[in-house]
Amino acid sequence: LQEHCLFLLNCHCCLAAIASTALPLHFLYYFPSAVTTIIRTAKKERKMTMHRTFRHVYFILSRIMLTTLALKAEWISLSTSKIDPRRSGHTSFIMNQKPFVFGGYIEQDGDDDMTREVINDLWQYNKGWTRVPTKGDSPGPRLVSASGVIGDKAFLFGGWDPETAGTGGVILDDVYCLNNNMEWEKMPVLFPDGPTSRHVAVSLNDDKILLHNHRCLDHVYVFDCSKFQTQPTTGISPGSVGLHAACLSSDNNDHVVIFGGATQDGSMSNQCHVLNTKTWEWKLISTSGSSSPCPRAGACLVPCGNHQVLLFGGAEATPSGLEPKNDVWILDWKRNTWNKLDCSGPSPEPRNAATLTVMPTSVESSQDHQFLLTGGWAPFRQTWDDAFALHINMDQ
């Protein structure tokens, strides 16, 4: 214990010396040379093994990061930005720097009771949600579909139309394109392994869209505006899950991160997998020993900083039923660490099946991130029509 305390004292002295240069402590997280300085100083004072040295240093830095990040997250209620009717299970995308939402499962208050149905409307956000008139061959009503963008065109893949209650509805395998003139076109291709829903789509940087569903055990699909390619993968894949969350990582934009989801028997996961889109190798992120989100499905996942992603909400399976969440986490998938953020401001009610969209930042800092939360539901209790902005400042 004495050795441990002396070591921590040495580390803190080193940190104090660095801080006296007026550089923010947050820079330690991004510059390994600072870690090297701490290690060399501590090892000179105490003869410890490199393994124990790095373990203590990493513990200190991770706690610094947790405190810093927790003070920099803020929810802002956008009370005038509601989307009507209220909905869940919709899909969102960014086209020409503008956020869009399509479809979903809506709830409306009638004269006698509440009505629920699937819809196929399109909305655009510009200081508030506005319904967009469209032309062409529009896709039919659906929820839990997936969408991605290539250039100035958005693509919609599959989904589920419950149709008449009790029938089970129909799972869809169609593909639609929305161009810059808000005109829909049905593509002359079908989803390669048949009808699919509760899947994910991620826009890559090379004019392609990556798709993953519950049948992608050793492969993913890559779409290039006109056709699908089956891309074999190696490593430990997410397996047979649906209602998982996915996004492109900001680390050179050549990694796709997939979190959580549910299997067909209803069990849920909190595993995180990262796919290198250069080598097509999956990596299972191991965060044993640190706090992490509970297993869940229907969460939101967005890129947030270098090799970091932000997770919001979802629903957890409990003995009393599905329990919605409103927690916010940041995963650094290179350092295998989760940090739970303590957000200020009016937090949204717990929900899943919402959308969280990356927004252009209003602050001139590369370390600022802003996201737009829309809709969602607390399973079998409440559907939401509200919108929130989540602002993350990582500049310290």
Image (spheres, rainbow, N blue to C red):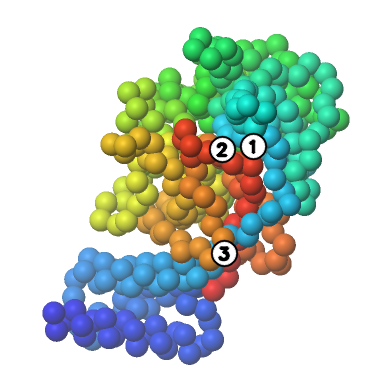
Task: Report the disc number at residue 345.
Answer: 3
Q: Nearer the viewer, residue 389 or 282?
A: 389
As measured in the structure, the alpha-carbon distance from the residue carrying label 1 to the one carrying label 2 is 6 Å
Instruction: Give the mark, 1 or 2, whose residue is nearer the N terminus.
Output: 1
Question: How dense is the environment of label 1, judged by Cα within 10 Å: few (below 14), some, or many (20 and up)?
Answer: many
Question: How dense is the environment of label 2, judged by Cα within 10 Å: few (below 14), some, or many (20 and up)?
Answer: many
Task: Report the disc number at residue 383.
Answer: 2
Image location of residue 242, percent across then percent down = 44, 28
Find out whether the residues at labels 2 and 3 contact each other: C-beta distance under 8 Å: no
Element type at marker 2? strand
Locate residue 332 relative to residue 142 in the image: left or right: left
Q: Name the residue located 26 percent from the left edge and 67 percent from the top edge.
A: 55
Residue 73 in view, yes or no: yes
Which quadrant holds the N terminus? bottom left
Q: Name the residue located 47 percent from the left edge and 71 percent from the top edge.
A: 68
Element type at marker 3? loop
**331 versus 5 height, above or below:** above
As measured in the structure, the alpha-carbon distance from the residue carrying label 2 to the one carrying label 3 is 21 Å
Instruction: Give the mark, 1 or 3, whose residue is nearer the N terminus.
Output: 1
What residue type is disc 3 on? Answer: Gly
Question: How dense is the environment of label 3, judged by Cα within 10 Å: few (below 14), some, or many (20 and up)?
Answer: few
**176 versus 80 height, above or below:** above
Task: Report the disc number at residue 86.
Answer: 1
As measured in the structure, the alpha-carbon distance from the residue carrying label 1 to the one carrying label 3 is 23 Å
**251 versus 234 height, above or below:** below
Image location of residue 87, percent across then percent down = 61, 34
Q: Name the residue located 73 percent from the left edge and 28 percent from the top edge.
A: 121
Q: Name the residue located 39 percent from the left edge and 36 percent from the top edge.
A: 322
To which quarter of the image does residue 195 belong? top right
